[in-house]
Image (cartoon, grey):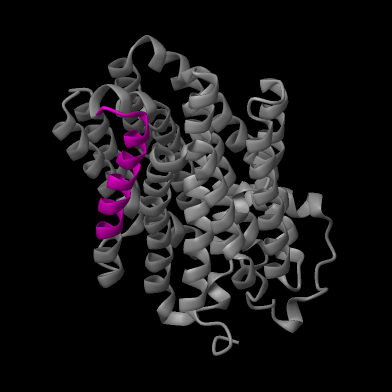
Amino acid sequence: MTRRYSLCLYLVGAVAARAGDEMSGPALMLAGFTLAGSTVEAASLLAGITISAAVGGPVLGALLDRAGRPGHLLAGALVLYAAGLGTILVGLGRLPFAVTILIAVVTGLLGPALSGGWTAQLPRVVLGDHLPRANALDAMTFSVAGLAGPALAGGVTQASGAPSAVVVSVVLIALALPTAWRLPARPGQARGARTTSVISDLAAGTRTIVGRPSLARATLTSVVSCVSQGMLTACIPLLGERVLGGVGRGAVLLSCAAVSALVANAVLARFPRSVAPDTIIWVSVLVQAAALALATVGSPVVLVVAVLIAGAGEGPQLAALFAIRHREAPEHLRSQIFTTGASLKITGFALGAAVAGPVVGWSLPGALALAASVAALAALAFFAYRVGYHGRP
């Protein structure tokens, strides 16, 4: 199995799909800002394609756990997601904005396929003691995608316009289809062994996430952290325009964060057992909170430094979260736990972007300060859950 489908092939497909995904968000937001001329509508478009993941993620994960060939299901999800992005692009400026938002919401149901749905297949690609290093490398694909996606979105927008950037993101997602299709099949003994309904599986997955303290703490902390990250992303167009001198340049800030995240995860991959993942979770959000507070200064140099610091916290946080999920998730619920966790994070990100949209129009430093406060709250949530759990009789 592992000879026919190598880790390298897995990582190549993951980078292509996730780069397209990371590019699509800024590209859609820049397209909305360019065509509508409103930060509120631009942020609403980003929120629309992400907020529905709360519904789509758990169901997609349950179906992946039951599929004999989960790669085929993932490939189908990628096709529909890419088609949805294309439809949104066609609708901008031609359809009522409310209709375009509705299309974005429907498309967003499949968003977790590019994140948690793919990562959940990793234990069938790499086995045993090699999994911790592979897990860190998998997290690095998000950093590589986070580096390439926004940079491409900004570069293509500057060169050919925001609509062209959306088209390129669709092409990148399409390039991942063959790799997704060839993902390893589920072992023969696991096929057809499920006698429970999808609803029962959804309930079991929820009980697992809530009932295992380490998994619950990590999930809660990461979701609140994603709210602050969504707020930062909503600030990107105006940060580019007011601090860096161009709307398209704002997307490059996300690439700066991805650079530092990539470096941090490279070190983590070299020493995968150096720090406990549970510790990394809460330390990383404090680092991000400090970085967001620093970003309120408004200087171009300070802003770039702040974004680099934020990435240094965000990258290891993701790798640690994956490690905890792999450690805590039962095999028969693994995909659901990954996609449910991903959907909760995506939804938190969407809520942050939606809340920050109006605040950015009122005060850019105020929106950044609010994002810093939410990131600090994520660390408090980690310890509050632990105290609450151990305090039970």
Whether residue 44 sits left or right of residue 22 in the image: it is: right
Q: At 50% across and 62% down in the image, what residue appears?
A: 16
| Residue 80 drawn at (x, y percent) | 72, 51
Q: Foreground residue, 193 or 67?
A: 67
| Residue 157 drawn at (x, y percent) | 43, 39
Q: Foreground residue, 141 or 217?
A: 141
**Residue 255 magenta-highlighted:** yes
Farthest residue to the top: give it.
Answer: 362
Q: At 37% across and 55% down in the image, what residue appears?
A: 143
- Work out which quarter of the rendered image holds the N terminus and state it: bottom right
**Residue 289 magenta-highlighted:** no
Q: Foreground residue, 138 or 344?
A: 138
> Which residues fall within the magenta stretch?
245-264
| Residue 136 drawn at (x, y percent) | 37, 65
Residue 390 visible in this rendered orientation of the protein: no
Residue 370 visible in this rendered orientation of the protein: yes
Whether residue 313 sits left or right of residue 189 in the image: it is: left
| Residue 103 drawn at (x, y percent) | 71, 34
**Residue 386, image quadrant:** top left
Q: At 49% across and 51% down in the image, what residue appears?
A: 215
